Image (tube, rainbow, N blue to C red):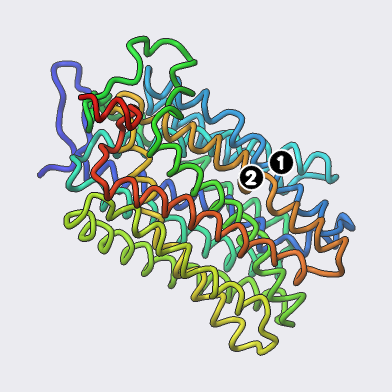
Amino acid sequence: MAAIQREGATGARALSPLALLAILGGLNLFNYFDRYILAAVLPYIQSDFRLGYGDAGRINTAFMIGYFVTSPLFGYFGDRGSRKWLIAIGILVWSAGTVLSGFAPMFALLILFRVFVGVGEASYASISPSLIGDSYDAKRRNMAMTIFYIAIPIGAALGNILGGAIAAHAGWRSAFFWAGAPGLALAFCLLPFKDVPHSHESLAGVPLSRDRSAISSVFRLFRLPNYTLTIAGYAAYTFVVGAFAVWGPSYLHKVDGLGEEAAATFFGVVLVVCGLVSTLVGGLVASAWQRKTPGGYALMLTLSVALAVPASLVAFFSRNLVLSMAAFGLSMFFLFLSTGPVNTLIVETVPGEFRASAMALSIFAIHLFGDMWSPEIVGRISDRYGGLQEGVLVLPVVLALATIAWGALAARMRRGIPVNDARGPRERRAR
């Protein structure tokens, strides 16, 4: 199949699904590179601005404010207008915010610039998965999503490894300059191509709302029980992953005694190796599981977080450096198993015309109740109770809550209830 196909007399061209996936996946890599570089340079920022753990965690909170507050807006317009233009604007804004972060002369301006990064990434993260969902049929969608989200461990690893190396040799400000520059160059790469048409697929045939123009219809997605359970577990999962990503290198440095650059490098290498392998394994196994049982995707989510609980406890309680580092890697491996299936469920548990809104609303919810607060909460607990080792102990508890929510989702889906059926048990029995 040709990667690019001509469309009509206007000369507009459409990307094939594979070419679109490749471009969006590459851009997603830069997305997570920009986001995770903060973790690598955080000890240097703490030293420069003389910040405690709690104030340092607030930098990520600022990013999340921009990210989650604007995501429903982007999702709303993404379901109704040109998605390629919204993506282009998002890339430009997040890249400019990253570069400006390197120029910040004071803590308050650094906070402001991280809000800009969050706004730009909200546009991209809300809309790109809906493009993929509309480009692939149900049989191939989970693997396409899995490939798209492979960018998370690779981008996060590059952010940690390159960010730590640049900060160690040229200063933390230079790390932000190098991270933001590629996005400024690539912001408009999708504009020459035709937008992907919006889908009207509905897996259960149950309409959500006849009035797609009403913004209230977006929030009525929470009337869909499977969607709500997916997001509830995802919020708890995101609480843990967000704090883990921000404080992981600092924990290895301050508690386990690794050097700053060594800690960032180790965390980055483990992220890319475990994340890449685990994301692929999780996607493949979940797809095979789903072919055998209606709850296959949800079972993979439940297994992912359930196994991560004991692994994280070993990482946080062990005083043996090798054992602690191994448990860190195992925790990340288990957590990344859910990357593809959870995003597949988000777009499959709603009617097709609401996919961008569903992704945007999920971003709003998981960050409002998840990693908007978790790095600062861990930081505040650490300041109050004596150190980072005490602060991180809240994370396995929250992972247990994710296990409960996704376990309930798996039980519901295995009973054969259609994925986006909003009717209650009495209505289903009456049919």
| Towards the viewer: 109 or 228 | 228
What amino acid type is highlighted by mark number 1? Ala
Which residue sits at x=41%, y=50%?
408
Q: Quadrant of residue 338?
A: bottom left
Question: Position of 365 compared to 3: left or right?
Answer: right
Determine whether 136 is above or below 80 in the image.
below
What is the x, y in percent for residue 118?
61, 39
Question: Position of 229 compared to 112: left or right?
Answer: left
The answer for how far apart the CA atoms under marks 1 and 2 are is 13 Å
Q: Quadrant of the C terminus?
A: top left
Which residue sits at x=32%, y=11%?
210
What amino acid type is highlighted by mark number 2? Thr
Does the residue at mark 1 contact the one at mark 2 (Cβ under 8 Å)?
no
What is the x, y in percent for residue 327?
55, 79
What is the x, y in percent for residue 152?
46, 56
Residue assigned mark 2: 98
Which residue sits at x=83%, y=40%?
108
Question: Position of 251 compared to 278: left or right?
Answer: right
Pointer 2 local density, CA inside 10 Å: few below 14, some 14–19, many at least 20: many
What is the x, y in percent for residue 227?
40, 37
Determine whether 264 is above or below 127 in the image.
below
| Towards the viewer: 36 or 88 | 36
| Towards the viewer: 95 or 77 | 77
Q: Quadrant of residue 117?
A: top right
Q: Nearer the viewer, mark 1 or mark 2?
A: 1
Question: Position of 52 compared to 228: left or right?
Answer: right
| Towards the viewer: 13 or 361 | 361
Residue assigned mark 1: 62
Considering the numbered disc 2 on the image, is that residue within a helix, a strand or a loop?
Answer: helix
Q: Earlier in the sequence, mark 1 or mark 2?
A: 1
Q: Quadrant of the N terminus?
A: top left
